[in-house]
Image: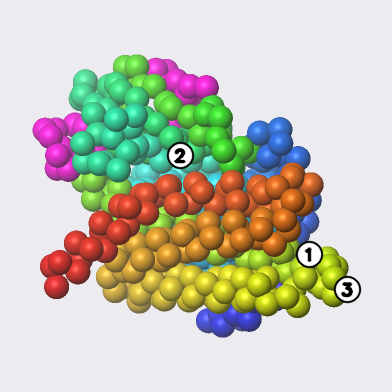
Amino acid sequence: MTVDRILPTAEAHDLLDLATEIADRELAGKAAAFEERAEFPREVLRTIGRAGLLGLPYPQEHGGAAQPYEVYLQVLEVLASRWLAVAEAVSVHTLSCYPVAAFGTDEQRKLLPDMLGGELLGAYCLSEPQGGSDAAALSTRAVRDGDAYVVSGTKAWITHARTADFYNIFCRTGGPGAKGISCLLADAGTAGIAPQAAERTMGLRSSPVAQIAFDGARVPADRLIGGEGVGFTIAMSALDSGRLGIAACAVGLAQAALDYAVSYARERQQFGRSIIDFQGLGFLLADAATQIAAARALTLAAARLRDAGRPYSIEAAKAKLFATDMAMRVTTDAVQVLGGAGYVSDHPVERYMREAKVLQIVEGTNQIQRLVISRSLAKG
C-alpha cells in the first residue's frame, strides 16, 4: 500500500526513494533466511551507512545529512516495513552516536564520520540484570585510576553486544542516584569487556542481544563524555529520541503486516467471494489502517516538536506507547486474517507478530511510558 507522505523538501523525497530502493533490494528478500539462521546482517548495515542513511539527523560537518527528525523517522519506517531487525539496528546505532554528537569533545567527535558512515557500529549499555527500568539505580562502577577509568559490572539486554565496535557505558563514578552516573565511550576490543552468549529471543533473532561483563576494563579518561555526573542526563535525552525511533519501527512493521493481510484477503476465496468482502474481516482491516495512520501522525507530530527545538519528551512517550501497542494489535489481527496459514512460517505475519512484542519493551517498557505520561498530568 502506498503511503501518501508530506515531506519538507525535494531532498527528503529523494532520500525516501533511496531508502525504498535499498530496502527492496537489500532487505526484503533476505529477512526470513537471516532470521532463521539468527545471523546479523552486518554488511547490510555498511551498505545503509555508505548510502548516507545512518547519519540522517546529525550535522554535515560530522558526516551526517542534517535532516529533520521527521524525515529520518520516515526512512526508518520504510526500512522496518521490509526488515524490522535492520531498522531496529539503525535506530540503536543512531542512539549510540548521540552521546558523542551532543555531549562529546571536539576530539571525541573526530570518530563521528566513521560512526555515521557505518564503518563503526555502536551499542548503548544502560540496562542491567537487576536494574532495567530503574536506570538511576545502576550499579556498574567506574573508578578513576591515573589516566583511565576501571570499569566493573554487568550490563544486560544490549543490542549489538557481540557485533559492536564501540560501547556507550553508563556507569557509576559518584554516589547513589542519578547524579552519580557518567558515560564512557569504550572500544569493543578493550581488555576486560566480555560479551556473553546471545539471548535466545522470541523475535528479532538476527539482532544479537546479550549481557556484557566488565571485569576491570580500563577505558581512557579522555573517553569520558560530558564530564562526571552527566551520564543520566545524556541517557534520558538520548532515550527521548530513541523512543521515536521505536515508534517509527512499529509503524513500519504494522504497515507491512496490513499490506500482507490485505493482499491475502483479496486473493483468498470463501463462499464464492474474496474474504475481504466479509464485514468481519473488512472492518478489522479498516481499523488496522486507521490505527496505523494515527500512530504515524502521532510519531511525526512529536518529531516536528523536536525539530522545532520545543519540549517533546511526553509526546515521544505517547508515540512510543501508542505505536507499539498498535503494532501488537495489528500484527495479531494479520495472523487472524490468514487463519491457519498465518500460524506457519510460510507467511511472514507470524514473524511480524513475534517481532512486535519486543517493541512494547525496548527503550522503556510501555508501563514506563504510562508512568511518564501520568506524572506529567499530575504536575499540571
Disc 1 to disc 3, how far (Cα)? Answer: 15 Å
- Asked where in the image residue 309 lies, by quadrant, the reply is bottom left
Q: Are marks 1 and 3 in contact (CB under 8 Å)?
A: no
Sequence order check: which comes first, mark 1 or mark 2? 2
Residue 248 seen by the camera: no
Sequence order check: which comes first, mark 1 or mark 3? 1
Residue 190 colored in magenta in the image: yes
Disc 2 to disc 3, how far (Cα)? Answer: 53 Å
The kind of residue tagged 1 is Tyr
154 on left or right of 49: left
| Residue under the image location 44 percent in, 30 percent down | 187
186 on left or right of 134: right
Q: Are marks 1 and 2 in contact (CB under 8 Å)?
A: no
| Residue under the image location 34 percent in, 25 percent down | 154
Most extreme residue toward the front, as rendered? Answer: 271
Sequence order check: which comes first, mark 2 or mark 3? 2
324 on left or right of 16: left
Q: Is residue 187 above or below residue 287?
A: above
Residue nearer the viewer, 216 or 342: 342
Query: Which residue carries the number 2 mark?
Result: 123
The kind of residue tagged 3 is Gly
| Residue under the image location 53 percent in, 41 percent down | 121
Query: Which residue carries the number 3 mark?
Result: 272
140 on left or right of 258: left
Magenta residues span 171-197
- The total of numbered circles placed on residues is 3
The kind of residue tagged 2 is Ala
Residue nearer the viewer, 299 or 71: 299
